[in-house]
Image (cartoon, grey):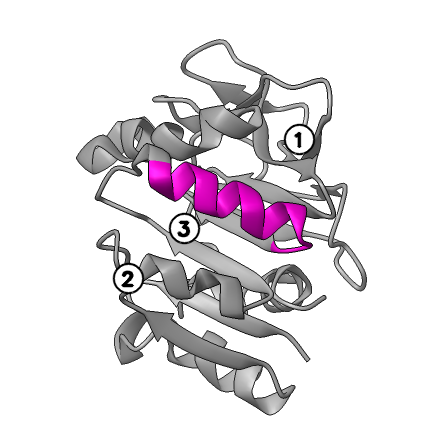
Amino acid sequence: MSKIAWDISHKEFTIEDHYYFSILKKKLSKIGAIVSEITNFKETTKFDILVLNYPEKSFTLDDVKLVKRFMEQGGRVIALGYYNNEDSIADTINSLAEHFGLKLMDDEVTDNVNNINDDKYFVVTSKVKAFNKNVKKILMPCTASVKILSNKGFPIVIGEKTAKTSSGNDPIIGARVKIGKGEFILLGTCVFWDNYSITKFDNLQFSLNLLTL
């Protein structure tokens, strides 16, 4: 089963926060996944999956090199942002993501039709192109869009036809790029798997699909 490194060395949200992530943590434990928080980024090499859940500290060139080696050897990196460059999240994530052909836009994705509670920021979509086993529809709240810079990049999640972005970018909410034997995944929101969203639609299954090999 997957060995997951949940990084907190770049000031990410901790999975140990019971209020936000207790359901995700419990479900991962139930399926036998091993989740370890890491404070030393070099420990990444010991794991299968690296989670960067709303990093607020920029990545150095040494970090980029380490992540590249990790993916070339088969590792999966999952970076998660938020909308409108909140806390400079787009700038921080792009200090890593742009090296691998993806960019988190400093925008917002809204949908006046496909949402919940009549809230255009709580985007709902059925266009899940990968990690979609037993997934029909997911909620992606307060999300930015993702721009694919590499010809090796592919969308994972796309908004419905009614979705719009404030930047004019396509409403791509998540994307992936193959790097060596591994891959880099960038998602426009970090709150689709918090305790509120994970109980909606197929968010739990989508989350578990992302975090298992």
Residue at 34% over, 58% down? 41
Type of amino acid under label 1: Glu
* Res 8 → quadrant: bottom left
**Real-space Cα distance between discs 2 and 3?**
14 Å
Residue 198 visible: yes
**First along the sequence among labels 2 and 3:** 2
Distance from disc 1 to disc 2, alpha carbons, whole Å, reads: 33 Å
Frontmost residue, 171 versus 15: 15
Separation of marks 3 and 1 at Cα, in angstroms: 19 Å
Which span of residues is magenta-colored?
Answer: 62-75
Does 88 appear above or below 38? above
From the image, tell me which residue sits under label 1: 160
Which quarter of the picture shows residue 194?
bottom left
Is the Cβ of the residue at disc 3 closer than 8 Å to that at disc 1? Answer: no
- Specify whether residue 81 is in view: no
| Mark 3 residue crowding within 10 angstroms, few (<14) / some (14–19) / many (20+) | many
Tell which tag, 1 or 2, sits nearer the viewer: 2
Query: Disc number at residue 190?
Result: 3
Q: Nearer the viewer, mark 3 or mark 1?
A: 3
Q: Is residue 33 magenta?
A: no
Give percent across and percent down for residue 116.
49, 48
On the image, numbered disc 2 is attached to which residue? 8
Q: Amino acid at mark 3?
A: Cys
Task: Find out whether the residues at labels 1 and 2 contact each other: C-beta distance under 8 Å.
Answer: no
Q: Please identify, in this view, whether the residue under mark 2 or under mark 3 is nearer the observer.
A: 2
Placement of 51 over or under 129, stated as above or below = below
Q: Main secondary structure of the magenta part?
A: helix
